[in-house]
Image: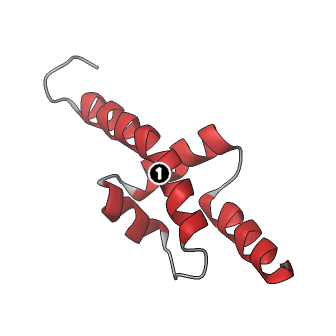
Amino acid sequence: AARGGGRGASDAHRDRVAGHHAAEVRLLLAREPRHRHTLESLAATFGSSPSALARAFRAQHGESIHRHLLRLRVGAALE
């Protein structure tokens, strides 16, 4: 897509923002595994769309946000 405001440019920007925040989401989940996080609330916290954040998180960490949070919670329960 051409620069300057087409839908493609907006989507690419959103994906970059989400990619930047995927590591921050992982840290937040580790600090607060018992909090009722939702994809929508996480995306709003980090200024991303839910779908872009979910894609970026999976691409960077190899699992969904939900799966990661479940692993954290199970690990905490076993301690």
Where in the figure is residue 38, as x and y percent of width and height? 49, 73
Residue 54 to residue 72: above or below: above
Where in the figure is residue 19, as x and y percent of width and height? 46, 39
Question: On the image, which quarter does residue 40 sit in?
Answer: bottom left
Residue 39 to residue 57: above or below: below
Where in the figure is residue 45, as x and y percent of width and height? 33, 63
Residue 63 to residue 39: above or below: above
Q: Dividing the image into 4 quarters, which one contains the N terminus?
A: top left
The three-letter amino acid code for the residue at tag 1 is Glu
Residue at image point 70% right, 51% down: 63
Element carrying mark 1: helix
Residue at image point 26% right, 28% down: 9
Q: Which residue is the extreme one toward the right?
A: 78
Residue topped by disc 1: 24
Q: Is residue 47 left or right of residue 41?
A: left
Residue at image point 75% right, 77% down: 76
Colour theme: secondary structure
Q: Is residue 21 left or right of residue 2?
A: right
Q: Is residue 55 left or right of residue 52?
A: right
